[in-house]
Image (cartoon, rainbow, N blue to C red):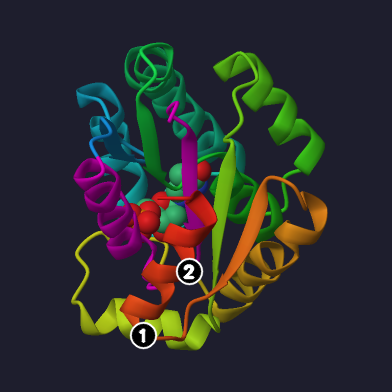
Amino acid sequence: MAGRFITLEGGEGSGKSTQARLLADRLRGAGQTVVLTREPGGTPGAESVRALLVNGDTDRWSPWAEACLVNAARADHVERVIRPALARGHWVICDRFVDSTRAYQGAGKGLDDADLCSLHEKVTGDLWPDLTLVFILEPAQGLARAGARGATEARFEGHDAGFHERVSAFFAGLSRLHPVRCHSIAADRPVETIAAEIAALVGA
Ligand code: TMP
């Protein structure tokens, strides 16, 4: 089985990080080499940029400053981790990627989707996932889950309800926009049920 690039996307508290771990465990159990990583982050430099993005006041950055920061982190991550792993035939499972930029900085903060996709093309050499799992959950439910976790990196959680509604609506429409690459996952179900659906989708 050749490695594939899989991303998990969705709003706050949608359970995607748990499912990313379970999928990585399952593939490793089947003898595959898997890089489990996240954005913003995944390299020392990108993790430093993450700290700038996820902490502090909600209005700390303008929308374009934020988009440039996530793309700076992504450029480093793609060049140093994701592309080398894929070139070796390994699997890469990434918790958030370009669709989060389109959802948060695009739909959420009003930047143009075509502009963001063109920036992504330049920054990553036009790297897109083979498969994107989009976790669908009512924003209020996700924020309650994330709040219950006592999240420390809570800058985005502090954005207003309208912001989270726009992010959620973007994710809800993503599988229609990219029917081959993206697959919606109903996230309000038991962890094991979702994990089994994902394993079947991936063929793991
Ligand atoms: P996490 O909560 O899934 O760890 O992600 C950290 C936050 O970063 C999350 O609130 C969404 C935000 N984010 C963006 O705003 N744009 C992006 O491109 C990415 C990857 C994340």
> Along the polypeptide, which appears first: circle 2 or circle 1?
1
Q: Is residue 20 magenta?
A: yes
Q: Is residue 172 left or right of residue 131?
A: right
Where 147 sits versus 121, above or below? below
Residue 63 on image: x %, y % = 59, 45
- Image spot of residue 15 (x, y percent): 36, 70
Residue 190 shows which numbered tag? 1
What segment carries the magenta color? 1-30
* Residue 14 visible in image: no
Neighbourhood count class around disc 1 (C-alpha, 10 Å): few under 14, some 14–19, many 20 upward: few
Q: What residue sits 24% from the left and 31% below the top?
A: 48
Q: Is residue 145 left or right of residue 74?
A: left
Nearest to the eye among marks 2 and 1: give it. 2
Asked whether the viewer can see residue 4, the reply is yes
Residue at the (74%, 25%) spot, across then down: 118
Q: Does the closest atom of ligand 1 sit within 8 Å of the Cβ of label 1?
A: no
Give the camera-side residue of 126 and 196. 196
What amino acid is labelled 1 in the image?
Pro
Instruction: Name the one closer to the observer, 30 or 57.
Output: 30
46 left or right of 182 in image: left
Disc 1 secondary structure class: loop
- The residue type indicated by label 2 comes to Glu
Q: Are marks 2 and 1 in contact (CB under 8 Å)?
A: no
Residue bearing mark 2: 197
Q: Residues within 10 Å of mark 2 (few under 14, many from 20)?
A: few
